[in-house]
Structures are given as structure tokens and as C-alpha cells.
Image: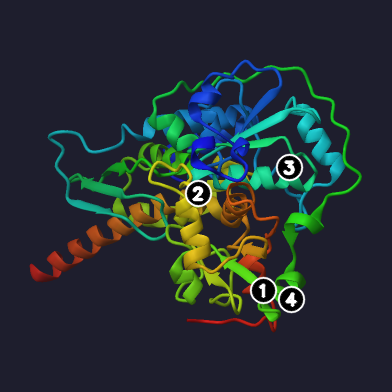
Amino acid sequence: MYPEKLNQIIDLFESLPDAEKRELLISYASAAMKQGPRDGDAFDLEDERKDEECTDTVGVFLQVSPQRACAFRIKLGPQVQTLTKAMTAILCKGLEGLSPEQIMEVPADFVPKIVGADLVRQRSQTVYYILTRMKGIARVWLNRERASAQLSL
Amino acid sequence: MSEKNYAFPEALVSTEWVAGHLADPHLRIVESNEDILLYDTGHIQGSVHIDWRSDLQDQTIRDYINPQQFAALCERNGISNDTTVIFYGDKSNWWACYALWVFRLFGHTKVKIMDGGREKWVAEQRHLTRAVPHFVHGHYTPPETRSDSEIRAFYDQALAQSRAGMALIDVRSPAEFRGEVTHMPEYPQEGVLRGGHIPGAASVPWKMAVKDDSTFKDISELRQIYEDEAGLKPGQDVVAYCRIGERSSHTWFVLTYLLGYKKVRNYDGSWTEWGNRVGAPIERS
């Protein structure tokens, strides 16, 4: 149902008691700041913006290999909430290597399995935001691919 | 805080003061945040975490815990009836003020806010720890009742306030007040069906009360905002509201402790109740 790498992360979270689950979320949140673009990185698409529904600017950077494997880099503003930071690192790792089509098919219902129902609240809905942004940039990449294919016909 | 001439300067403590009282056995420092995991990433040494939703609210109905649950919450956080509780948190102390307000509902009056909240503490590069504090459990005699009537307003009371032309302060963003949006900037929709404000309410966004470093403005600036511009008068009966009651707790704190208003109530049902209520009068401007 879920991509393999993401599924492994989900399984790990589901196996943990609440206290350790929180610890792992903190660990992922700490890793989120390392998910940003690095010097020398080249991307097919870059989408950096501040949306109404998130507390700070989020930049999503996509590189798609000739084998159609996606690699994401995500830059987060300092005001982004801890859960959103954790989800960023989880998604960068869990969705690495998927094709744009596979990215588009990732269901969002894994979030409570990772975060725990207690932590998913009205005010923490931005945990879904990063996946939405990743799907958004994958959609743009696919649209451009289709457009260039039509042009070459 | 006496230099700012607040009505109750003792209700605020500075980050410096807190840093010098970390080992005071008569104090308990409480962090209360919107970011659910922020405390876990690092907190003031010895502080405990009290969550607005899972600790202070009833888990089934939209209301607060009862006196016995409050006493149990205090005891497990090392708070006794005579403990002075210092609140701080993110978002310029929104949830710290909310938690303080809930403590007041249970008659706990030895409460203070750390001016500037977590943002100021972090900006000053003061120490944060991930260590879980260990302390002796408190002994808390629960109050007989929760004092809802003094500092809390319900729908009917807010409606009566509106109909009587008495002071109502809407602390949401101007766009929410005007009914242009039903959520605050940077936040998801929280299920409100109608936009606008309670008829007769004055718009004074909570943020007007704080400076860029999240500390409260001094008394002369606060008087200008709430009295000269919004038209409040000392001694007035005031009801403040926002969307779920946390931003209005911040304003409640300002009016009660800094400006010294005697009767200020927080309408915690706020716009998520009013904007969904069938037949509730709404004004847009």
C-alpha cells in the first residue's frame, strides 16, 4: 500500500510506545534542517513560497533522474512546527527514489500511524502540508514532461 | 516590571528573573505551547509541560477538566496550592496565558507570565535542556467548583453583552473580523461556517499588545490602544474573544493584570461557536 521505504518507517513508528515515538519524531525533526539544498545541487524544479496554511516559508526542490527516480530537498523556515519538520525528514527519506507517478499516489492516511492520533490536531494539520507540496511539484514535473512530449510529436 | 507601571507588575517576570530562580522550590515553571513537540525539543531547566488540549480540556466534551482532575494535574506536576506557577510558551505566550487563565478558573491565583515567552528566552540564547525534571509530587486540595462565572463568558453572556452595547473585544486578525476569511493567517480552517464578528465588538488584534520581541508593551502604549483607540474605559465589564479562546486569553491577561480592569471575561467558545451557531447575529464590516 505504501512505498517500501516509507512503509519501513511506518512499521518502526507503529512498533514503538508513545514516549519512544515522540523521541523518534524529535530525532527526525532535528534531521529536517539537513534536508535543504546543498551547494552544487541542480534541480529540475524549485518551488519556494509562503502559503497561508503554513507558519513559515517552505522550499521544495525536485530532481528527477533519467530513470525517473525522484530526489527531494526541502528547506524550512524557522517557524515551521516540530511535527512538520519531522514529517519533512520522514518524507524525504521515505519517498526517495520513487517516480513522479508513484509520488502522486502516496496516500496521506499514514500520517496518524506515524505521528499518533493524539498529536494530529486541527492545529497540527500542517503535517500533511509537506506531502501536498511534494505532490504538487511532482505534478508540475509530469505536466511539463507531457507538454514536451506533445511538442516533440 | 514595576518600571512599566502595570496595574499588577508582579504578574510578570523577566527571562533574567526566571534564570535566577530555577532552583526555587516554591516555584514551578510551566511551558505551554501550540507546537505540540516543542517542549520535547528543549525547555527551561526544571520546567514541566502542560498541554492546553490533553491536560486542561475535557477529552470528550468542549469544556475544561473538573476540580479533581485539575488537582491531579497539579500534583503530578509538582504543584501544590501554595506554589507560584510561572507560565511561558511559544506564540508570544498565547498558550501560557491560556493555561494561566485556566488555573485562575480553579482559583489558583499565584500565577505569573514570563514576559517575552519562549521566543525571548531562545533569542537570548539561554540554556534549554531535554532532561525530564524530577520533583516531589504536590499536594493539591481541589477547589469545590470551577469559577466559570468570574472570568469566563458563555454564548448567552456574550450575546447579552452585545445586545446591551457593552464592551466586546475581538482580538482576531482584521480580515477575520471583517468576515473576509474564517481562519487566521497561516492556519487551517477550523470548521467555522460563517465569517464576521459579534455585533458591536471592537477589533483589537492581540498582537497590538506586544513588541517585536514578544514582550508586552508598556502601560501608556496599552492605554492608548485599548482606551484611546478602542474606547474601553477603566472599570468596564469587558468580554474578549477570538476563535477558540487562546488569543483572547492573551488579551484577557493584558486587560486584567497589566491595565487592571476588574471584570474581564474570556469567551472561550469564541468564533468557532458563534460562527456556527444557528441564528447568532453577525456583523460584517
Q: Is residue A140 above or below residue A20?
A: below
Q: What residue lies at 40% left-to-right and 39% top-to-bottom? A: A94
- Identify the disc placed on residue B166: 1
Q: Earlier in the sequence, mark 4 or mark 1?
A: 4
Q: Nearer the viewer, residue B182 or A24?
A: B182
Q: Residue tagged by mark 3?
A: B103
Q: CA distance from mark 4 to mark 1?
A: 8 Å
Q: Position of residue B13 (x, y in %)?
A: 56, 32
Spatial CA distance of label 1 from label 2 is 23 Å
The answer to whether the residues at label 4 and label 1 have Cβ atoms under 8 Å apart is: no
Q: Tell me if B24 is positioned left or right of B152 in this view.
A: left
Residue ranking furthest to the left = A152
Element on which disc 3 rests: helix
- Residue B23 vs residue A28, the one in the foreground: B23
**Residue ID for mark 4:** B160
> Disc 2 sits on a residue from what chain?
B
Task: Indicate which disc, 2 or 3, sits on the residue closer to the N terminus.
Answer: 3
Instruction: Tell if the residue under mark 2 belongs to the same chain as the one under mark 3.
Output: yes
- The chain containing the residue under callout 3 comes to B
Task: Say what amino acid the circle numbered 3 marks.
Answer: Phe
Frontmost residue, B89 versus A127: B89
Q: Which residue is mark 2?
A: B219
Tell me the kind of residue under disc 2.
Ile
Distance CA(mark 2)–CA(mark 4)? 30 Å
Going by the numbered disc 1, the residue's amino acid type is Met
In the rendered image, residues at marks 2 and 4 fall on the same chain:
yes
